[in-house]
Amino acid sequence: QKEVEQNSGPLSVPEGAIASLNCTYSDRVSQSFFWYRQYSGKSPELIMSIYSNGDKEDGRFTAQLNKASQYVSLLIRDSQPSDSATYLCAVNFGNEKLTFGTGTRLTIIP
Amino acid sequence: EAEVAQSPRYKITEKSQAVAFWCDPISGHATLYWYRQILGQGPELLVQFQDESVVDDSQLPKDRFSAERLKGVDSTLKIQPAELGDSAMYLCASSLSWTEIINEQFFGPGTRLTVL
């Protein structure tokens, strides 16, 4: 069974610091990876997508992919209170549908 | 800005009643998805459409759930009869095409269903 694992948290980070969120997945034959942000009671919002090994940067967000070790991470630089949310990792295992992790709850402390 | 539209935003119903949810994807998006998200968990795919055809409905409880996308644009998800365990957020998402290398999916605001 194809699985996506995330630490449920909560992860607490001081304002202005770097928040690091991690995700591991079960199948080496995985094509693409996504990070979604979900505020309480709201729907998921796409932040980043990545499919090549290495880093991909977009503003304060950096996605890191290591297919050999089967993990993908999201770094948030200069964390702001508005970054407090649940972050969902999603993986396309090559069957064209996304499998989501249970999410990591992030709290930015002012 | 292009968005996925869903209605209603909230629905309260009694068990054994029928409920229906509507979704209008981003214009030009051929692939439409219905997900169910239980509190504290990630979204789980119920059904996936490419245009008007079902690509995957393996996780759809077909004894009580049905979905259609008759003209390949908007879609309806129905539950009949609703059960207490169906209380969840029902999310619709769309993407350009599931055959894209990076198939970015964009979610609508969701429908929060409460079954009493």
Image (spheres, helix red, strand yellow):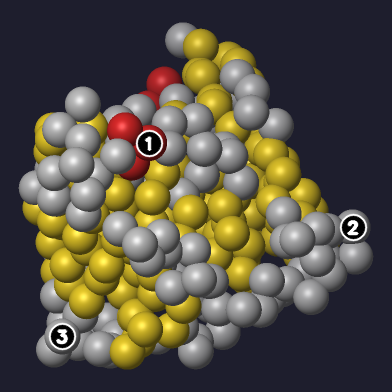
Query: Which of the image's four quarters has the N terminus of chain A?
Result: bottom right
Residue B37: name its quadrant. Answer: top left
Residue type, label 2: Ser
- Tell me if mark 2 has few (under 14), some (14-19) or many (20+) residues whose alpha carbon lies within 10 angstroms of its own: few
Label 2: chain letter: A
Front of the two marks 1 and 3: 1
Q: Are marks 1 and 3 on the same chain?
A: yes
Q: Is residue A87 above or below residue A41?
A: below
Query: Mark 1 or mark 3, which has the lower sequence index?
Result: 3
- Residue on which the image places disc 3: B70
Q: Position of residue A62 (x, y in %)?
A: 61, 51
Q: Work out how far the residue at label 3 is from the one at label 2, CA to CA, in angstroms.
A: 43 Å
Residue A102: name its quadrant. Answer: top right
Q: Position of residue A39 (x, y in %)?
A: 36, 33
Front of the two marks 1 and 2: 1
Label 3: chain letter: B
Q: Is residue A71 above or below residue B29?
A: above
Q: Which mark is residue A69?
A: 2
- Residue on which the image places disc 1: B85
Label 1: chain letter: B
In the displayed image of the protein, which residue is found farthest to the top? A110
Q: Work out how far the residue at label 1 is from the one at label 3, CA to CA, in angstroms.
A: 28 Å
Left or right: where A25 falls relative to A85: right
- Tell me if mark 3 has few (under 14), some (14-19) or many (20+) residues whose alpha carbon lies within 10 angstroms of its own: few
Left or right: where B24 falls relative to A52: left
Q: Are marks 1 and 2 on the same chain?
A: no
Nearest the eye: B78 or B91: B78
Secondary structure of the residue carrying tag 2 is: loop
